[in-house]
Image: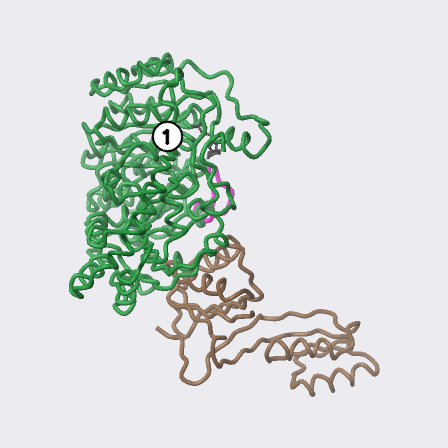
């Protein structure tokens, strides 16, 4: 099962490597990982997408909690939550493809944020499935480059991760 | 007051009432050593290899309820220390390791004797710090001591760049530590404790299984109270020996790969299992799938939530400090006025006695060659069960665990988790320094002892009158045993040729050496050795090279699939 684990961690040098080191040392899987400081700069928030059985996810949460610098851990995918990911795609945009790219970008509510005579850079946000389907929908041979941030997520309504 | 970083280090150690620091100097810690030179409150013990320093600090910690402290230089000093740190980490030993680092400005430049100490040690410490600002040095050391001994204990490393130890700043030792990200639980959940009590009182075939946590948290007294109140059988893991008196009728011996028949059978067939400060590891329950074949209710008390339901599913998890939780359970049972199901428990004991009747630890007592079991039994008798016993890793370790009956906690020191050959001798040094005048034995093999043999020199310098009991079988015995049983008798590289003359070797270090070759001489030699209160005596016992450790559960098999002896 796919899980989205969110954690608050002290914003200290080396803290991130404790988290990633834990995953590799215990052979847990990381699908994606995002990290940045929160509104309180002494803390960072990490979102990890991992795939594993319930037992493994339980261990992952416990092991993360055990790290001295980790302040709080929740599996936000246990209940209603929102996930977003940002993707930048550089595509070839010449001739009839130029119009087609613009159209696809509009359909997926993307924005073209860089334009040259031959290329576009399209910015797209959404959940992982939406970004995947954009890639599926356009002509693969026109993709020059893609970059994705990985998932960040937040609980709906009253579910709040805060200290 | 304004002090240099090096002065601050010493001040902090004094504040923490550190008696001994085990260490080895080098470039990046010279300022710190300079401060050692100027005071005599904290004593420094100069080992002969950094691995020895960490094991010695570890032995010191295991045999007391204090934190062990080691000091090493950057680069090779640290890498040499890693085995010791990992050993302590696997067994949750409270320890602070201070390491020197190249000056801050040189970090990352492949400077002379630079290694990424924080990176190398990260997976084998409870936590580590690189101090980049001298103003944070005192609070970091305070945190290190706090982390090392609170919650589930473990080694904590503080890496100090050379320039930091020379820089001055205002010094004040913090009185307390508050960390928003670290708050170990003490009190067990009352609802869970109630559930546990109910299960225990309803049990028909109860079993109590306790591990190293009982020793580390000084919970032996509370455990004994509960065990006696309930009248249930109890087993200890290799790490938990001494957690319950081995000479007590309710003790059914150690369990696990080389556990007793009765302990393993009872563990498998019980209907309610109370696990206390133990972690169901592979050497203890064998294959979890086989373990799950007989359904049982499991209550698990541990300070570390991640130890619970890691390898086996637990029905009643209780996170908390063992003495506290055990006390709660005992009191709740007393208050309830209920008693365990006496009829059922009596029938269960009858079954256990039947298993015990197999006498699985019997061996050939008429042998003309010295049997290792006999040596350990005599060691037990001669020391009246009062010795501190440190062991290395191999067959001798298992014989020591099986045949020396530990009635008290903190008397048995061995590397259970990492299985580090070379642990025994340096650990024994730490134990002897912590307990001057007490009998300290190091049970070892000719393979293991050579992994830290250089520490015989340290023993001479500090006049440590250890008694080394070398069970010399000429083989890396435990490896040979596996090769005999599982690799068609092909003894690949397990015969140790060209052994030194250990008597002469001991003598060359200025100690007393003895060679014992006949069973009739064993007791006399041990008596003589322990009489020599001021000398380190190195006893080289020529034991039966073909002897194996039984019972044995093969790795990956179920607990009850025991090989009991050669014939079976
Ligand atoms: C540092 C290290 N290297 C290798 C091993 C693997 N190993 C486990 S037991 C053993 C043999 C130990 O031989 P010895 O010390 O002579 O003890 P014996 O088994 O003969 O009693 C070995 C090599 C280990 N545990 N530790």
* Residue bearing mark 1: B362
The percent coordinates of residue A156 (x first, y second) are 46, 83
Q: Chain of mark 1?
A: B
Seen at 29% across and 15% down, the residue is B512
- Along the line of sight, the residue nearer the viewer: A139 or B52: B52
Label 1 secondary element: loop
Q: Position of residue B194 (x, y in %)?
A: 26, 67
Residue B156: x %, y % from top left: 35, 48
Chain depicted in green: B
Q: Is residue B166 visible?
A: no
In the rendered image, which quarter is residue A123 located in? bottom right
* B175 to the left or right of B213: left
Viewed as shown, does residue B177 lie left or right of B155? left
Answer whether residue A61 is magenta in the image: no
Give the color of chain A as drawn. brown
**Crowd tier of the residue under label 1, counting other residues whose Cα lies within 10 Å: few below 14, some 14–19, many 20 or above:** few
Say whether residue B412 is visible.
Answer: yes
Secondary structure mostly seen in the magenta stretch = loop
Question: From the viewer's perspective, is residue A143 above or below residue A23?
Answer: below
Residue B110 is inside the magenta segment: yes
Q: Residue sitting at 68 percent across and 70 percent down? A: A146
**Magenta residues, as a range?**
B106-119
């Amino acid at each position: 099962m796919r899980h989205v684990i969110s954690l608050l961690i002290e914003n200290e040098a080396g803290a991130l490597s404790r988290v990633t080191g834990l995953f590799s040392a215990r052979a847990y899987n990381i699908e994606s990982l995002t990290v940045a400081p929160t509104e309180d700069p002494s803390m960072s928030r990490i979102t990890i997408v991992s795939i594993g059985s319930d037992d493994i996810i339980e261990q992952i949460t416990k092991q993360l909690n055990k790290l001295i610098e980790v302040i709080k851990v929740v599996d936000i995918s246990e209940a209603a939550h929102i996930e977003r990911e940002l993707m930048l795609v550089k595509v070839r945009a010449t001739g009839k493809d130029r119009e087609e790219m613009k159209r696809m970008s509009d359909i997926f509510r993307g924005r073209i944020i860089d334009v040259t005579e031959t290329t576009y850079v399209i910015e797209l946000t959404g959940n992982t499935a939406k970004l995947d389907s954009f890639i599926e929908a356009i002509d693969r041979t026109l993709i020059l480059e893609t970059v994705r941030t990985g998932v960040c997520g937040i609980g709906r309504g009253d579910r709040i991760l805060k200290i | 007051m304004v002090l240099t970083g090096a002065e601050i280090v010493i001040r902090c150690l004094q504040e923490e009432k550190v008696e001994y620091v085990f260490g080895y100097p080098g470039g990046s810690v010279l300022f710190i050593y300079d401060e050692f030179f100027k005071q005599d409150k904290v004593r420094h013990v100069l080992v002969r290899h950094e691995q020895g320093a960490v094991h010695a600090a570890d032995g010191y910690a295991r045999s007391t309820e204090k934190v062990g402290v080691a000091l090493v230089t950057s680069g090779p000093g640290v890498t040499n220390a890693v085995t010791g740190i990992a050993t302590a980490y696997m067994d949750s030993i409270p320890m602070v390791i201070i390491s020197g680092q190249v000056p801050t400005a040189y970090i990352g430049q492949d400077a002379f004797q630079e290694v990424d100490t924080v990176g190398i040690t990260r997976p084998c410490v409870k936590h580590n710090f690189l101090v980049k600002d001298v103003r944070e040095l005192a609070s970091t050391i305070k945190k290190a001591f706090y982390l090392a001994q609170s919650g589930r204990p473990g080694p904590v490393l503080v890496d100090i760049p050379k320039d930091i130890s020379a820089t001055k700043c205002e010094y004040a030792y913090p009185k307390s530590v508050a960390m928003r990200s670290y708050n170990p639980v003490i009190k067990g959940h009352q609802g869970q404790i109630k559930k546990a009590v109910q299960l225990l009182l309803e049990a028909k075939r109860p079993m109590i299984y306790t591990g190293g946590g009982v020793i580390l948290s000084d919970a032996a007294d509370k455990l004994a109270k509960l065990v006696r109140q309930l009248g249930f059988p109890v087993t200890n893991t290799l790490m938990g020996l001494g957690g319950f008196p081995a000479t007590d009728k309710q003790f059914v011996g150690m369990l696990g790969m080389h556990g007793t028949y009765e302990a393993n059978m009872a563990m498998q067939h019980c209907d309610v299992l109370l696990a206390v400060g133990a972690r169901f590891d592979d050497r203890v329950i064998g294959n979890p799938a086989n373990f799950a074949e007989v359904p049982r209710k499991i209550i698990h008390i541990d300070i570390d939530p991640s130890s619970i339901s890691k390898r086996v599913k637990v029905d009643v998890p209780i996170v908390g400090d063992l003495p506290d939780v055990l006390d709660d359970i005992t009191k709740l049972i007393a208050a309830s006025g209920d008693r365990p199901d006496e009829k059922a428990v009596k029938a269960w004991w009858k079954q256990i006695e039947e298993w015990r009747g197999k006498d699985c630890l019997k061996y050939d007592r008429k042998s003309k060659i010295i049997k290792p079991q006999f040596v350990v039994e005599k060691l037990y008798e001669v020391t009246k069960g009062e010795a501190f016993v440190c062991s290395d890793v191999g067959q001798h370790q298992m014989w020591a665990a099986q045949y020396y009956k530990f009635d008290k906690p903190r008397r048995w020191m061995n590397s259970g988790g990492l299985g580090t050959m070379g642990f025994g001798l340096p650990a024994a040094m730490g134990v002897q320094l912590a307990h001057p005048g007490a009998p300290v034995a190091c049970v070892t093999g000719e393979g293991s002892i050579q992994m830290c043999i250089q520490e015989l020199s340290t023993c001479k310098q500090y006049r440590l009158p250890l008694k080394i009991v070398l069970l010399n079988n000429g083989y890396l015995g435990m490896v040979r045993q596996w090769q005999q049983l599982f690799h068609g008798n092909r003894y690949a590289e397990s015969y140790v040729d060209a052994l030194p003359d250990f008597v002469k070797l001991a003598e060359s270090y200025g100690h007393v050496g003895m060679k014992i070759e006949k069973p009739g001489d064993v007791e006399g030699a041990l008596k003589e050795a322990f009489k020599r209160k001021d000398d380190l005596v190195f006893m080289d016992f020529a034991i039966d090279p073909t002897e194996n450790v039984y019972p044995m559960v093969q790795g990956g098999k179920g607990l009850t699939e025991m090989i009991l002896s050669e014939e079976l």
